[in-house]
């Protein structure tokens, strides 16, 4: 399965809780599996690895459900198993997202064979992958959105570079206004 294919949607979830013993986690995983099958998901058992611990996780997809149903099911599972978030990918989108309990989403980049121990890795049929949160940016043409001490990025010669604003008034007039006019001034949100 190509995890970035725009024609597919899926969720990656675990019922594992680190404070529970292995028997309790096994029961939770069994319950998760039962719920996913009852909701007509196809599931693939995968292993998650984080903080030197392995956990059972599931890659689940339902070809007949739309993006709204997928999100609704994912939120239900987050609450049912008291998880902080799940990984979700919607049909017709390239990026995978992290979906939180409150419904907020953050875009993720897929890394294959990632060795960064700060990222949760997943293993499926000998293939290792992880997801890393991507920064989100807002372009600005409005000086009022900028503040002293703020880090902005400007695009010069097709390369983005970070700059710290020391004096908004002075720097806006001398530099940032021109970059903003050409949509080459952004800040992370």
Image (tube, rainbow, N blue to C red):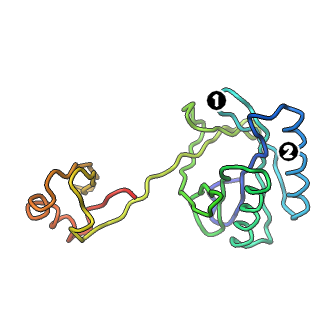
Dot 2: few (<14), some (14–19), or many (≥20) neighbours within 10 Å? many
Position of residue 94 in the picture relative to residue 126 (left or right): left
The answer to whether 46 is drawn above or below residue 22 in the figure is below
Dot 1: few (<14), some (14–19), or many (≥20) neighbours within 10 Å? few
Position of residue 67 in the picture relative to residue 33 (left or right): left
Position of residue 148 in the picture relative to residue 77 (left or right): left
42 or 117, nearer to the observer = 117
Count of marks placed on residues: 2
Q: At 65% from the left edge and 65% from the top edge, which residue is drawn?
A: 90
How far from the left and from the top, in percent, is residue 100? 62, 57
The answer to whether 41 is drawn above or below residue 66 in the figure is above
How far from the left and from the top, in percent, is residue 146? 24, 61
Place residue 26 in its image quadrant: top right
Q: At 71% from the left edge and 29% from the top edge, which residue is drawn?
A: 53
Determine the secondary structure under disc 1. Answer: loop
Check residue 73 in the rendering and tell me which mark sits there, or answer none.
none
62 or 165, nearer to the observer = 165
How far from the left and from the top, in percent, is residue 47? 76, 38
Q: At 73% from the left edge and 66% from the top edge, which residue is drawn?
A: 70
Q: Of callouts 1 and 2, which one flags the residue occurring earlier in the amino acid sequence?
A: 2
Residue pointed to by mark 2: 29
Residue pointed to by mark 1: 51
41 or 82, nearer to the observer = 82
Determine the secondary structure under disc 2. Answer: helix
How far from the left and from the top, in percent, is residue 55? 76, 36
121 or 150, nearer to the observer = 150
In the picture, which quadrant includes the C terminus? bottom left
């Amino acid at each position: 399965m190509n995890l970035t294919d725009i024609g597919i949607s899926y969720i990656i979830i675990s019922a594992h809780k680190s404070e529970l013993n292995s028997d309790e986690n096994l029961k939770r995983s069994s319950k998760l599996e039962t719920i996913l099958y009852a909701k007509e998901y196809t599931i693939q058992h995968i292993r998650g690895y984080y903080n030197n611990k392995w956990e059972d996780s599931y890659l689940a997809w339902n070809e007949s459900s739309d993006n709204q149903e997928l999100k609704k099911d994912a939120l239900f599972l987050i609450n049912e198993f008291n998880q902080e978030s799940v990984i979700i990918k919607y049909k017709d989108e390239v990026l995978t997202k992290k979906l939180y309990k409150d419904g907020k989403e953050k875009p993720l980049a897929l890394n294959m064979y990632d060795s960064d121990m700060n990222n949760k890795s997943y293993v499926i049929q000998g293939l290792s992958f992880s997801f890393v949160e991507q920064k989100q940016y807002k372009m600005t043409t409005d000086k009022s959105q900028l503040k002293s001490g703020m880090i902005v990025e400007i695009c010069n010669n097709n390369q983005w570079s970070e700059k710290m604003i020391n004096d908004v008034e002075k720097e806006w007039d001398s530099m940032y206004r021109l970059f903003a006019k050409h949509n080459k001034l952004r800040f992370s949100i």
